[in-house]
Image (cartoon, helix red, strand yellow):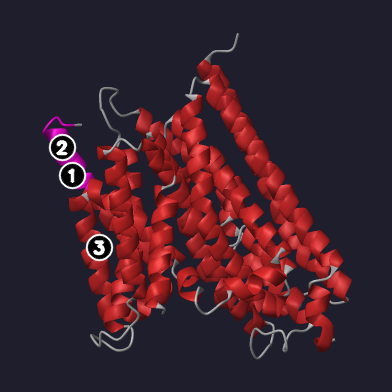
């Protein structure tokens, strides 16, 4: 069984099962996209604004998409191609999948997560555990999304109408700043103490990449705001990321 | 003739209905797939091992999922959050993508415009990811050596720092006072306890709480001054 398990995991029927689920989710996305577009028109939203949201989101997603593809490649060596393809197209997250797959392999009794150690029962166990571990967001969303948002919006509606800006919007920006700060702090912490407290021997590449990407973003923002190249806004994040990633190639670490 | 409010109300009602239905169908498909593949291979999951594994690793992700639901749902709105929780990759893609679209279009969280823009953004982002992965899987043999070449490896290992560098600039320049405190606190924390880097996604919670607390203080101050 071991000899050809990866071939079996990448066989036509397994592709059909995983591809079918991905196709279903793609249809769901199209349905939500079309409904939102029509609702936008119905409530009088500017078509140009909606088009910009779509264009910016499409260009934004290509590079992270390629990064996620690498996750598929990384996991394909132990789980075949279709299952990681499904996991990272639907529900999964790049930074979770490898960790959960490795922990699931341990729970399934494998010495390590690898193609040579994989067996059919171990794969079925790992696949089910991977699904179970990261499904709670979807369940909570299905059960409580409506109630939760209604409660939050109810609170916002109670605020006086004359306020120029509600705290909800500020809180969302603050939460995002908190999220970015946690990641940037972790890069600094890794550099300073990653290889021993205050050793300054940890990896500095993420710090440089983030700084270069931020500089590229500053330049593109300046061009957009001062030189009236507003069209750049649609691609500024993707372009800045590309410049940051190129810096990583130049550093070579 | 239906007015705008009625159109939005009907849209929202159907979004929740559709969102719940597709979430449950996707859930069943994802839980059913290991059994279907197992049946093809002539093996079934070891439910005892699944239970043991869930206790050892699943509980952490359960806590993380609850936090993600509470934090990200208001950011994304109804349609966007149903889709985002189905398609995944929230932190490294969907949240920044929706925030970017919101900023470019100039909508505010919790408004009906943002509900639409966020859904358009998440749906587009999910479709692009599905297409990129499908194309990548289709071209896996010729692409593998390029994507896995040692020369390009650092680029793909640093997608998230590149993303947060660009997004960080965008948000920090507008909220410098607000950004400085969580950044300094998080940096000190990660420097003194480098082991925390493996739990960065969980450290978002205290960092976000600090930023929101500070934002609340600034907001109250502005309120007293009549600036909001």
Q: Do tag 2 and tag 1 residues touch (Cβ < 8 Å)?
A: yes
Q: Measuring from the top left, give residue A209's x and y in whole percent.
A: 35, 67
Whether residue B206 is visible, yes or no, is: no
A36 with respect to B70 (left or right): right
CA gap between label 2 and label 1 equals 6 Å
A36 with respect to B216 (left or right): right
Q: Do tag 3 and tag 2 residues touch (Cβ < 8 Å)?
A: no
Q: Measuring from the top left, give residue A183's x and y in whole percent.
A: 36, 65
The residue singled out by tag 1 in the image is B218
Badge 1: chain ID: B
Confirm whether circles 3 and 1 share one chain: yes
CA gap between label 3 and label 2 equals 23 Å
The residue singled out by tag 2 in the image is B222
Q: Measuring from the top left, give residue B102's x and y in whole percent.
A: 41, 39
Work out whether residue B80 or residue B43 is closer to the camera in this orientation and state it.
B80
Question: What stretch of residues is rendered in magenta?
Answer: B215-227
> Which is in the foreground here, disc 3 or disc 2?
3
Which residue is rendered at x = 64% and y = 33% of the image? Answer: A34
A77 with respect to B210 (left or right): right
Which structural element holds mark 2? Answer: helix
Q: Main secondary structure of the magenta part?
A: helix
Badge 3: chain ID: B
The residue singled out by tag 3 in the image is B183
Badge 3 density bin: few <14, some 14–19, many ≥20, Cα 10 Å: many
In the image, residue A184 above or below residue B7: below
Q: Does the magenta stretch include residue B216?
A: yes
Q: If the image is split into quadrants, where does the C terminus of chain A sit?
A: bottom left
């Amino acid at each position: 069984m071991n000899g050809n398990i990866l071939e079996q995991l990448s066989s036509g029927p397994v592709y059909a099962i995983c591809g079918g689920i991905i196709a279903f989710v793609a249809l769901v996305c199209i349905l939500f996209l079309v409904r939102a577009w029509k609702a936008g028109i119905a409530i009088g939203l500017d078509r140009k604004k909606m088009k910009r949201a779509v264009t910016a989101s499409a260009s934004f997603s290509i590079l992270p998409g390629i990064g996620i593809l690498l996750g598929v490649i990384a996991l394909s060596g132990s789980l075949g191609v279709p299952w990681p393809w499904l996991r990272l197209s639907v529900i999964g997250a790049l930074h979770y999948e490898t960790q959960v797959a490795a922990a699931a392999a341990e729970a399934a009794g494998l010495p390590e997560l690898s193609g040579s150690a994989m067996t059919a029962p171990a794969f079925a166990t790992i696949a089910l555990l991977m699904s179970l571990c990261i499904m709670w967001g979807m369940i909570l969303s299905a059960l409580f999304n409506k109630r939760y948002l209604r409660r939050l919006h109810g609170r916002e509606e109670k605020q006086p109408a004359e306020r120029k800006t509600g705290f909800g919007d500020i809180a969302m920006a603050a939460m995002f700043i908190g999220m970015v700060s946690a990641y940037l702090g972790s890069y600094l912490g890794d550099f300073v103490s990653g290889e021993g407290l205050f050793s300054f021997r940890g990896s500095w590449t993420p710090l440089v990449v983030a700084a270069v990407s931020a500089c590229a973003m500053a330049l593109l923002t300046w061009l957009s705001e001062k030189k009236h190249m507003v069209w750049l806004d649609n691609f500024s994040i993707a372009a800045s990321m590309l410049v940051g990633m190129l810096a990583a190639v130049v550093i070579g670490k | 003739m239906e007015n705008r409010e009625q159109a939005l109300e009907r849209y929202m009602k159907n979004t929740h209905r559709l969102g719940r239905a597709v979430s449950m169908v996707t859930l069943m498909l994802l839980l059913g797939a290991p059994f279907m593949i197992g049946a093809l291979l002539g093996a079934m999951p070891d439910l005892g091992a699944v239970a043991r594994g869930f206790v050892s690793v699943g509980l952490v992700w359960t806590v993380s999922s609850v936090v993600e639901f509470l934090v990200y749902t208001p950011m994304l709105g109804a349609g966007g959050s149903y889709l985002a929780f189905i398609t995944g990759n929230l932190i490294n893609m969907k949240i920044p993508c929706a925030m970017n679209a919101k900023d470019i279009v100039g909508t505010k969280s919790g408004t009906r415009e943002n509900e639409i823009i966020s859904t358009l953004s998440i749906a587009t982002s999910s479709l692009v990811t599905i297409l990129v992965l499908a194309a990548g899987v289709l071209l896996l043999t010729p692409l593998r050596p390029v994507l896995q070449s040692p020369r390009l490896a650092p680029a793909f290992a640093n997608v998230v720092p590149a993303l947060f560098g660009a997004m960080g600039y965008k948000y920090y320049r507008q909220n410098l006072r607000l950004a400085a405190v969580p950044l300094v606190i998080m940096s000190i924390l990660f420097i003194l306890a480098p082991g925390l880097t493996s739990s960065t996604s969980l450290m978002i919670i205290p960092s976000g709480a600090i930023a929101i607390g500070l934002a609340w203080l600034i907001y109250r101050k502005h309120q007293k001054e009549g600036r909001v």
